[in-house]
Amino acid sequence: MIRDTSAQDRLIQVKPSRKKKLLWIGGGVAALIVLALVLPGIARLFSADASVSASRLAFATVERGPFVRDIAAEGQVVAAVSPTMYATYGGAVTLQVHAGDTVKKGQVLAVIDSPELVNKLAQEESNADAMEVDYLRAQNDALKQKSQMQKAYDNAKIDDQTAKRDLDRYQKAYTQGGVPQMDVDRAKDAVEKADIALQHAQSDLNLNNNTGNFDIQAKKLAHDRQVLLVQDLKRQVDNLNVRSPVDGQVGQLFIAERATVAKDAQLLSVIDLSALEVEVKVPESFARDLAIGMTGEISGNDNNWKGIVSAISPEVVNGEVAARVRFDGSTPKQLRQNQRLSVRILLDHRENVLTVQRGSFVDESGGSYAYVVRDGIATKTPIRAGESSIDKVEILDGLKEGDNIVISGTDNFKGAQRVVISR
């Protein structure tokens, strides 16, 4: 049997350490506190459909105040009146001015050399003179023919009177037995014959008057037509001198000196600097609210001017609509064609309107809902959005003043009803 130390061992009672006890109690309390803080977050996490970092989102607060809808855009100065001159007839062109020259209304800007047109005018003037002679000859012939017919009528009238006197004389002689009945009958026949001749002479005279008048009228109409043709050719020849339709400045020259051009070719443009406007490109989404007569502001060169929308294009090009804004009052003198200016057009101005900063949420939701953030949870809330400006959106229903909403980045929510916003 092997000896051991069991006889020497004795059981010693270990008393618990107060310090360790306090440490354990403190740790338990701390754990409870942590649990109390974490549990609501965990509960929210499990109650939400998704979680998105706040760094990927943008927020804004719903406010009440003035709401201004306007359009801000860059525009360029254009002439309200900027006619382009065209060649009215083909030929060699001699320019009388240079680009940038100041010109007056009616001043000759270019001369077109067209011998063919000038020669044609001379020919038609000669034809007009010949037709005038024909017209005068027709008048003379008509007078001569009328004189002859009048002479025949007068002779017939005299013959008729003579025949009637003879009949009267034969009848008196017959009653006294001086002449036989045969002579009386012969005198009666002579009267009837003279009456018929007189009637025919009267009819011929009337017909001749009508025929002469018709011939004169035909010659006159032909001559008048030729005169109109000559007048038109004179106008065309006069238009070979290309004149300025307005007071202004020569803009662009489209041809070189002594160039030969065809009819209707562009020659040059004239800019009326007394009537300048600013042309702007407006996005199609705003163009439907734009109307002629709306007021605005034009700025540039450290100056501001009042403006009025004067024209709106009916055509959409590349998602934009062209509009023109004229100066309200006299045109500033220091402006130049194609100069860049800033334009701001006022569409609407109201006070005490519920608005929120504009963001992509309007396009993503179509203005039908927004995510309202409370206690770190973004909740999908039905809303009704109104008009939009460049930086604000009108809220008609669904939100109240002071609400904090997500204005961009909601595409990360993928339509979830509740989303946790993590820091």
Image (spheres, rainbow, N blue to C red):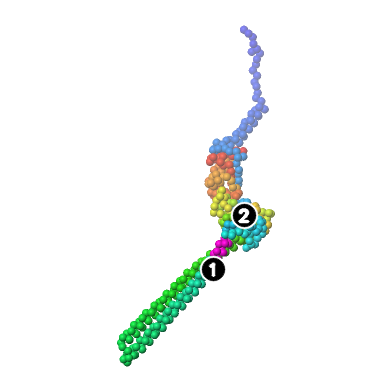
Please name the residue that numbered disc 2 is placed on: 259
Query: Which residue is denoted by mark 1 in the rendering?
Result: 129
Percent coordinates x, y for residue 194 in the rendering:
37, 81
What secondary structure is found at the residue carrying circle 2? loop
Q: Which quadrant of the rendered structure holds the C terminus? A: top right
Report if residue 124 lies within the magenta region: yes
Look at the picture and state if 197 lies above or below 364. below
Front residue (pair 17, 181): 181
| Type of amino acid at the residue the image marks with label 1 | Asp
The overriding secondary structure of the stretch rendered in magenta is: helix
Q: Are marks 2 and 1 in contact (CB under 8 Å)?
A: no
Q: Position of residue 80 (x, y in %)?
A: 61, 58
Depicted 214 relative to depicted 312: above or below: below
- Residue 86 in view (yes/no): no
Would you say 250 lies left or right of 205 here? right
Residue type highlighted by circle 2:
Ala
- Mark 2 Cα-neighbour bin, 10 Å: few <14, some 14–19, many ≥20: some
| Secondary-structure class at tag 1 | helix
Q: Nearer the viewer, residue 23 or 239?
A: 239
**Mark drawn on residue 162:** none
- Give the Cα distance between marks 2 and 1: 36 Å
| Total numbered labels placed on residues in the image | 2
> What's the residue at 39%, 80% (across, down)?
198
For residue 189: magenta? no
Q: Which residues are magenta?
A: 117-125
Task: Residue 173: give x, y in percent of width and height.
Answer: 34, 90
Q: Residues within 10 Å of mark 1 (few under 14, many from 20)?
A: some
From the viewer's perspective, is residue 237 above or below residue 32? below
Image x and y of residue 55, in percent: 62, 39
Q: Residue at x 33, y 88 (%)?
A: 171
For marks 2 and 1 on the same chain, the one whose residue lies earlier in the sequence = 1
Q: In which quadrant of the rendered view does residue 347 lie?
A: bottom right
